[in-house]
Amino acid sequence: MAAMTLEDLSEKMAKIDFGMLSTRTEGGAVASRPMSNNGDVAYRGDSFFFTFESARTVSDIAHDAQVGLTFTGAAGLLGGPPLFIAVEGTAELIRDKAQFVRHWTKDLDRWFEQGVDTPGVVMIRVQAGRIHYWNGSDEGEVAL
């Protein structure tokens, strides 16, 4: 099968709501937590997530911006293995409400009741450097 392109991955990622964001703690341990992409996946190598300033995720990224993202799709046809995606990237903490608006969806109001004006909201932008995928028996890598 032909290698998947960034556009192929974007199309598939749009169907996956939650992934795992992994950071390195100040003590050197790896910490992972589920994050929703909120349907914001016109994917060109950047992922956007929202959290609170007080979250350990924020202090981890402030200490070490190198992060990992993993996504798992639904099972393939006839029960075949799902699509697995692993992203290596660099995270940036964004506190600018104007940038929040560009990536805000109404589903976020469930966690952030005052929308972009919720006190302590932080947006995390993960810029991918490399994406590895496994799609059934095919695997490949996209470098950005």
Image (cartoon, grey):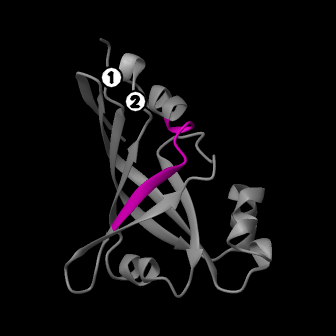
Q: Which residue is mark 2?
A: 75
Residue 131 drawn at (x, y percent): 33, 42
Asked if 79 appears above or below 38 in the picture, the reply is above
Residue 37 circle label: none
Quadrant into which the N terminus falls: top left
**Inter-mark Cα distance, 2 to 1:** 6 Å
Q: Which residue is mark 1?
A: 80
Residue 37 drawn at (x, y percent): 56, 53
Is 130 placed left or right of 42 in the picture?
Answer: left
Residue at image point 40% right, 81% down: 62
Q: Amino acid at mark 1?
A: Gly
Q: Residue furthest top?
A: 1
Q: Amino acid at mark 2?
A: Ala
> Does residue 138 belong to the magenta stretch?
no
Residue at image point 80% right, 77% down: 114
Q: Which residues are magenta?
A: 13-22
Q: Residue furthest left?
A: 28
Asked where in the image residue 51 lies, by quadrant, the reply is: bottom right
Residue 70 drawn at (x, y percent): 36, 50
Residue 105 drawn at (x, y percent): 74, 56
Task: Check disc 2: other Cα within 10 Å, few if <14, some if 14-19, many if 20+.
Answer: few
Contact flag, marks 2 and 1 (Cβ < 8 Å) = yes
Asked if 119 appears above or below 112 in the picture, the reply is below
Residue at image point 70% right, 66% down: 100
